[in-house]
Amino acid sequence: MHIMVTNDDGINAPGIIALAAALGELGTVTVVAPDRERSAVGHSLTLHAPLRVFELRKGFYAVDGTPTDCVNMAIHSLLPHRPDLVVSGINHGANLGDDVTYSGTVAAAMEANLMGIPAIAVSLATLAFERQGHFDAAARVALGIARQVTANGLPADTFLNVNIPNCPAEEMQPTLITRQGKRSFVGTIIDKTDPRGRKYYWIGSVEPAFNDEEGTDFHAINRKHVSVTPLHLDLTNHDSLKVLSQWPL
């Protein structure tokens, strides 16, 4: 098997190192990841600047672009073989509910899915600004799910968003298949003044509150279950089609 690994935390992040090592049991792993942190870049693609690639060591390539760039560079240029599987992560922090729309980790798996390659996004549910994480335990979980994907395949137009509780393996509860949850988001803009009197701004928010509904990814993670959510790219609100078709457009 040929497995491509990427992330949005940068090629030197502990999560991607643990993930690549674990997936080595399944096949040949090539890491193609951003040269620095690219969190919350979503599904962005670099179109107005050239990309540069640096081979740090055998099988490890750093790209000065986004996670989506990395998937494109790997599949169309760097890899000698089309990968059998793309795994993105392990992200430092959960990607639950509506946050998947911002996530570079999820976007990399999405890009692979667009190319018809089975893909998994993997995140470790660390708390905000928590520096330590049980990445080795999470990597073993990711390996188990990757084995299932390679053995059974995935439904058409589907990729997986996996969130893993930040705890030792013996404390994890059974894996659950979940749906994408919802959160209550309060956005803020923090404005400051620099020493020269010029305004500058930080986009921020209070800690998001997720709706703790049974069957959702957040409900599972909150109880130390591994959450596996099947995602696809059809954003059509099918329930609204009938309503809007009545409009006199």
Image: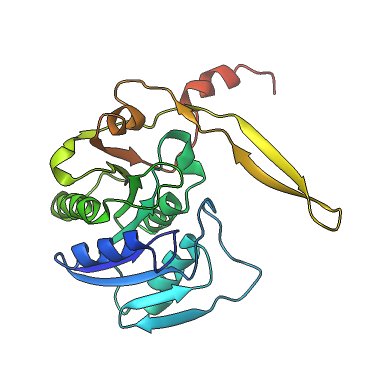
Count all numbered tags in the image, as a single digit: 0
Residue nearest the observer in this picture, 74 or 245: 74
Residue located at (40% from left, 68% from top): 11
Residue located at (56% from left, 61% from top): 45
Hey, which residue is sitting farthest right in the picture? 197
Q: Quadrant of the N terminus?
A: bottom left
In this rendering, position of residue 147 left or right of residue 69: left
Residue nearest the observer in this picture, 155 or 144: 144
Query: Residue 237 in the image: x percent, y percent?
Result: 50, 28
In this rendering, position of residue 77 left or right of residue 152: right
Hey, which residue is sitting farthest front in the picture? 195
Residue nearest the observer in this picture, 155 or 89: 89
Picture layout, residue 117 above or below residue 172 = below
Residue nearest the observer in this picture, 1 or 65: 65
Residue located at (65% from left, 44% from top): 203
Query: Residue 47 in the image: x percent, y percent?
Result: 62, 67
Q: Quadrant of the C terminus?
A: top right
Asked whether residue 157 is in view, the answer is no
Query: Residue 174 in the image: x percent, y percent?
Result: 15, 35
Asked whether residue 243 is in view, the answer is yes
| Colouring scheme applied when the structure was drawn | rainbow
Query: Residue 224 in the image: x percent, y percent?
Result: 24, 34
Picture layout, residue 229 above or below residue 103 = above
Quarter occupied by residue 94: top left
